[in-house]
Structure formats: C-alpha cells, structure tokens
C-alpha cells in the first residue's frame, strides 16, 4: 500500500503564501507516484488549491467541518460546501478537542455527515481509549484513523515507532484491519521512515514540517525511499 502523507497547515497561510508554497513544492510532489499526498490548507484556501492541483496527483483535504448540515449557524463550513472540492477531511484533532471543546459525540456527528457526502474522514485519536469510544459511536468503517499523542504534537518529541505500532494495532482492534492507521506528532524527514517500516502504520500526518515546502518535499522523498 502506498503511504498516505498528509500536510496539515493548521491556522497558517494566506492565499498568497499558499501560492508561494505550491510554487516551490508542486513540481516536486506531482511526479511522486508511490505515495498518496493530501494537502489540508485552511478553508479560505480550499478553492484556490483545488484549482491549482486539478488534474494533478495531489489530493485535497479540509481541516474541519461543521457538525450541522446547513442553516442558521453563523461562521460554519458545512459538508455540502466542501463536497465537490475535497476528498478528505480531518476530524477530531486534539487541538479541536482542547481549544474548541469538541467531544466524541460531536466528532461522530461530523463523521456521519462526511460519510453521507462521500468525503473520507481522517479521524484523529490521542489513544486507544478514544478510538474505542469513537468506534462505538460511528457505524462507518470507510475512514482513516490517525494516532496523534498530544505530547508529540508540535513538541519536536515524536512517539517511539514501536509504541506507535502498538497503538495502531490496538486501534485496528476497534475499527477493523482494513482501516488505514496513520501516525502524527513531530514527524520529520529524519524520522518518517521509522514510522513506515511496519505495515500497521500506513502513513503520517505532518504539521510543523509541512509549513516549509522544501522540508515537506524532503519528507515525502524520505517516506518514499522507506518503501
Ligand atoms: P506536528 O503536528 O507535526 O507539528 O507535531 C502534527 C499534528 O498536529 O497532527
């Protein structure tokens, strides 16, 4: 299976900066055939990136979606709005739980909406307990799960690959063997191959290192050489 490599730019980048990033990285990323590369810009840049990567090998994901289908919910971006633009959407990132009080129930509602619109959820969990809880709340198994321990996010201290493999096995017990499991948390070009050396982890979710186009290109090259 080709590794899934996700760039999560979080709350960074104006549209001009997005254009600059793609200007520097796109020609290096597009020829990569042995990986599924998914870019997750902020909502304001989704249509721009959609236009710039049409007909390319790169894929687009949103970082978040409303738990309401549509209506009087000022400021929300709904699945209907994302549909036709993105193929993937992050849900339940620990930053959403921490700063926006998201609960497993709310995350499950978002997953159900995404499923209805055929947008693949990339569900972030901090541990096996959260995976178990969510697996009870959501029926679909058409999703990707990313194991993201909070101690590793943005800290420069990644989890050990062995622990990531152990947790990934644990998550698969609840979501099934067919569901791809990713690892996220301080992934770099230097350590990415160590997380991809066991088949149980099928990709990585990259925050900080994806902000620099050159570093992300290097990370993708390193991930490819690991396979
Ligand atoms: P990081 O973020 O790569 O900056 O640690 C990862 C994440 O939030 O998923």
Image (spheres, helix red, strand yellow):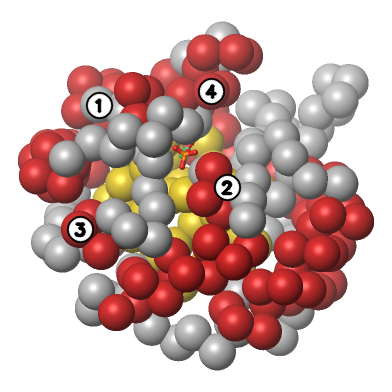
Which quarter of the rendering shows the N terminus? bottom left
In the image, 33: left or right of 215?
left
Q: Tell me which label, 2 or 3, sits earlier in the chain.
A: 2
Distance Cα–Cα, label 4 vs label 1: 14 Å
**Which label belongs to residue 95?**
4
> Which residue appears at 23% of the width and 43% of the height?
175
Residue beneath disc 2: 8
Q: Is residue 34 visible?
A: yes
Q: Give percent across and percent down for residue 127.
A: 25, 26
- Residue closest to the eye, 57 or 120: 57
Q: Earlier in the sequence, mark 2 or mark 1?
A: 2
Callout 2–callout 3 Cβ contact below 8 Å: no
Find disc 1 in the rendering and name its residue.
127
Q: Would the CB of label 2 be found within 8 Å of ligand 1?
A: yes
Left or right of 97? Residue 75 is right
Q: x, y (%) of residue 34?
A: 38, 83
Residue to which mark 3 is pinned: 194
Which SS class for mark 2? strand
Compared across the picture, whether 34 is left or right of 197 comes to right
The answer to which image quadrant residue 99 occupies is top right
Res 225 → quadrant: bottom left
**136 or 42, nearer to the observer:** 42
Q: Residue at x 40, y 53 (%)?
A: 188
Residue appearing at x 80%, y 28% in the figure: 76
Q: Is the CB of the residue bearing disc 4 within 8 angstroms of ligand 1?
A: yes
Q: Do the residues labelled 4 and 1 touch (CB within 8 Å)?
A: no
Beta carbon of the mark 3 residue lies under 8 A of ligand 1: no
Q: Tell me the CA gap for discs 3 and 1.
A: 20 Å
Q: In this view, does 77 lie above or below 151?
A: below
């Amino acid at each position: 299976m080709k590794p899934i490599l996700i760039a999560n730019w979080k709350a960074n980048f104006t549209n001009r900066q997005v254009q600059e990033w793609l200007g520097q990285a796109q020609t290096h990323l597009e020829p990569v055939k042995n990986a599924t590369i998914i870019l997750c810009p902020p909502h304001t840049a989704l249509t721009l990136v959609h236009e710039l990567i049409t007909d390319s090998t790169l894929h687009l994901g949103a970082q978040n979606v409303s738990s309401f289908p549509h209506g009087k919910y000022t400021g929300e971006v709904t699945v209907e709005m994302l549909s036709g633009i993105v193929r993937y959407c992050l849900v339940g990132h620990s930053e959403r739980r921490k700063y926006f009080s998201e609960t497993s129930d709310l995350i499950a509602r978002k997953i159900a909406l995404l499923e209805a619109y055929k947008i693949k959820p990339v569900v972030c969990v901090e541990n096996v307990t959260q995976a178990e809880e969510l697996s009870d709340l959501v029926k679909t198994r058409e999703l990707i799960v990313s194991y993201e321990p909070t101690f590793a996010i943005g800290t420069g201290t990644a989890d050990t690959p062995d622990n990531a493999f152990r947790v990934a096995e644990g998550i698969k017990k609840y979501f099934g063997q067919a569901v791809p499991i990713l690892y996220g948390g301080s992934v770099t070009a230097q350590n990415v191959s160590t997380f991809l050396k066991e088949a149980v982890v099928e990709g990585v979710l990259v925050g900080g290192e994806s902000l620099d186009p050159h570093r992300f290109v290097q990370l993708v090259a390193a991930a490819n050489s690991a396979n």
